[in-house]
Amino acid sequence: MSRFLRASLVLLSFGVVTPAFAGLPSYDLELKDGALNPQTLKVNAGERFKLNLHNTGMGPVEFESPRLRQEKVLAPGAESFVVIPPLKKDEYEFFDEFHLPDAKGRIIAQ
């Protein structure tokens, strides 16, 4: 591990440095064996945000949205996130690639 990375981790642990995504509006999405909760997320257009992904199911899931240019695979029980850049007013589809055609949702930027 480089000295820079090691020093950054130490500073992060003491709260001296905060990640670039700290303080962003945050939304939760549960992916569970082909079910998405919620299926529709409403966000503010023009605002960058963090989407917290929670796989509460028994198998792997893949959050994917070609239009948002996001893709993330999560093992059972795993949690992760994606940071979405500011969106124009519109609807943006996302889905669980491993559980199509049922697991589809949308983000509405308003």
Image (spheres, grey):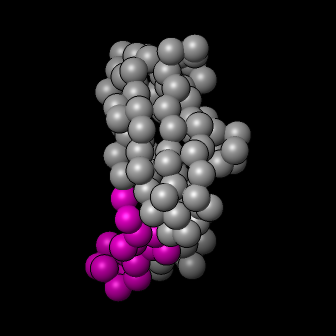
**Which of these two is toward me, 50 or 109?**
109
**Which of these two is toward me, 71 or 66?**
66
- Asked if residue 10 is positioned above or below residue 78 in the image, the reply reads below
Quarter-of-image position of residue 32 = top left
By secondary structure, the bulk of the magenta-drawn segment is best described as loop
Which residue is at 40% across, 28% downward?
36
- Asked if residue 92 is positioned above or below residue 24 in the image, the reply reads above
**Which of these two is toward me, 63 or 45?**
45
Where the N terminus falls, by quadrant? bottom right
Q: Describe residue 15's horizontal placement relative to residue 99 as left or right.
A: left
- Asked if residue 91 is positioned above or below residue 48 in the image, the reply reads above
Residue 35 position, x and y percent, is 39, 21
**Which of these two is toward me, 76 or 33?**
33
Identify the residue at the far bottom of this view. Answer: 16
Which residue is at 57% across, 35% downward?
94
72 in magenta = no
Residue segment shown in magenta: 10-26
Query: Number of numbered discs present?
Result: 0
19 in magenta = yes
Identify the residue at the far left of this view. Answer: 14
Which residue is at 58% across, 66% downward?
86
Residue 41 position, x and y percent, is 41, 45
Q: Describe residue 91's horizontal placement relative to residue 38 as left or right.
A: right
- Asked if residue 9 is positioned above or below residue 91 in the image, the reply reads below
Quarter-of-image position of residue 79 = top left
Which residue is at 34% across, 32% downward?
37
> Can residue 77 be seen at all in this image of the molecule?
no
